[in-house]
Image (cartoon, rainbow, N blue to C red):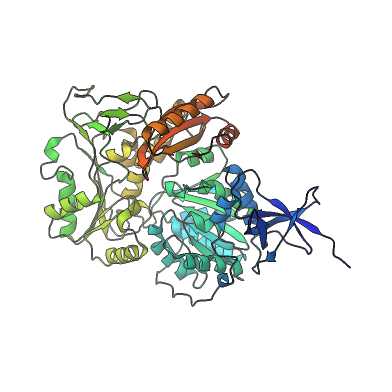
Amino acid sequence: MTKAKKYWLISPTESGGADEFAYTYEYGDDLAMGQLVEVPFGRKKSLGVVIAEAEKPTFETKPVTRLIELPLIPAHLVELAKWLASYYLASPKAVWQTLLPAGLETKAASPRKKPLPEPEGFEEPGVNKAQQAALDAVWNGQETSYLLHGITGSGKTQVYIELARKSIESGRSAIILVPEIALTPQIEARFKTAFPGAVIPTHSGLTPAGRRSAWFRALIAEEPQVVIGPRSALFLPLAKVGIIVMDECHETTYKQEQSPKYQTDAAAAKLAHLAGAKLVMGSATPAVTQYFWAKEGRIKLLEMTERANRITPAIPTVVDLRDKTLLNASRFISTPLLDAVKSTLAEGRQSLLFINRRGSASSLICGDCGWVASCPNCGIAITFHADHMKLVCHYCNYRQTPPAICPDDKSTNLRYLGGGTKRIEAEMARLMPEARLARLDRDSSTPAYLHQLYGELNAGKIDILIGTQLVAKGWDLPMLDTVGIVSADTMLNVPDFTAAERTFQLITQVRGRAGRGDRAGQVIIQSYSPDHPAIMAAAEDDYERFATTELAGRQALHYPPFTYLLKLSFGAKTAETSQRRAQELSEQLRGLQGVALSGPAPAFREVQGGRYIWQIIARSHSRQSLIGVAAATPAGWTADLDPVNLL
């Protein structure tokens, strides 16, 4: 007797269109949601994921050609894939490339068991009263999402460990997300000590085979696991998830820059809802948008206001770089900062000099009064373009010839900000030749170097570390006494609406590296704008004051969280072509009800990969309206919903 045909909605992983997530195929036997199969798609075969059983269609269907002998993809991940495609207007191909490792359809893809590495030693402290209160509030609470606002050094990581322990004891796995590979060695060591044999690390530093092995470990695990890694770790196929932690939740690296251009906090909240888990977002400096959600009651706010070591951190010293007498020895390192580093070295302790790589020699500032050239329309710093000899706003394309004198105090001491890690390293080698120096930036952030550097710092083999944003992200260095922020202005004058927020966050995070051992430490902030609200609030460690001021400014200028944003970008081999196409699209979009446009204007990094990039910024109180704009955008354009910045 011939079996009756059955019909199934299957999502081919090679489907590049955003219109259809799944197609109807036929197969004689039962299939299950999350089952991997091979299906014909166009003129070739494609891996496919079974979504659901379908009604008999009115059109001819193609058959499933092969079953892939692997366990089912968990239902919550299948549902998350559908949501990612819809919410971020992404193709199934882009979504499945994000969720699945390459090579699943081959026989060689089957997992091979390897001996687990021995955990690195780490003596776990007990939880204090504040940590226990946060732990109880999450585990016993009724909400799905929590914002753990804990000052630097308050012991948030120990709360994460205890939450993971409770999750595992309840038979459910834990996902611990970190913003950067730089944090992985430290946090991995602590979790391996707490959960020997149950930790699955995954990150971009692994080979494709290593990442696939981690994915398979999660898929076939019979016992609860602890997954640790950057944003992609969210998508490992754990059967049951009890807790999701997003450490340093404010970091911009949690934004995926390729399609699907998801925000990890949104994706993690959705996954927690689908999996019946809880999400904890932790930071000393949450994004003001996240803080706004908490104040609005969309997520539960928890606070930890004391350091775990009970040592009160020192109040930072703000050095006014407009005082030229403080720059006698160096144009970058002031006398107070140099004296502090020298005294720290004499005591056998360590110093950190922080430089922000996002800043460049493009912001025009007055060295006498601190005036900064800014756009009268958008309220952001405008950028100098040497090819046109113009200051340009990268939101609305406002242009201005650089002034010869400062419009505020009539000074001629106008300068362009600069000074990268290599230049500061050379300067410190000249000023303090006896000191042992090390540098940490994007050029030196390989996994092997990070492990080596972290070990040498803890062993006291380095006197001065010169680093970028990587060192601000949770490193725990007990011998670090002095922190110097070489120029707060390179952060403050980045031409973006998040510049003040990033300045406050980075100063707070970097100053939090000092005083984590047995001393209070000292922090020195160098700036031409010492009275700026972001710098003053960071120096006084007053997050609430900063957030209140920043949110008021965002509301007045119609920036998130009070509106939604869409960044549309187009690249061409010539600037003229890119500008013309941007102007054509801008004309088409003008007049859309409920959508406001800025631009077109050249991107902050106008030339990327040999192509000239122009962009249009759309704002709306309706995210759905922006999805409609993105869906109607012509071929060749890139649409980024909910961008974390507009650079």
Residue extending farthest right = 1
Q: Seen in the image, is 434 located left or right of residue 98?
A: left
Q: Position of residue 454 (x, y in %)?
A: 32, 63
Q: Quadrant of the N terminus?
A: bottom right
Residue 185 versus residue 324 in the image, above or below:
below
Q: Quadrant of residue 517?
A: bottom left
Q: Quadrant of residue 343?
A: bottom left
Front-lying residue, 419 or 59: 59
Q: Position of residue 121 (x, y in %)?
A: 39, 72
Q: Seen in the image, is 406 located left or right of residue 619?
A: left
Q: Residue sitting at 44 percent across and 64 percent down?
A: 206
Q: Residue sitting at 35 percent across and 39 percent down?
A: 605
Q: Seen in the image, is 58 located left or right of residue 539?
A: right
Q: Position of residue 312 (x, y in %)?
A: 32, 51
Res 373 visible: no
Q: Position of residue 186 (x, y in %)?
A: 39, 63
Front-lying residue, 41 or 398: 41
Residue 184 versus residue 583 in the image, above or below:
below
Front-lying residue, 447 or 293: 447
Res 553 visible: yes
Q: Quadrant of the C terminus?
A: top left
Residue 252 versus residue 574 in the image, above or below:
below
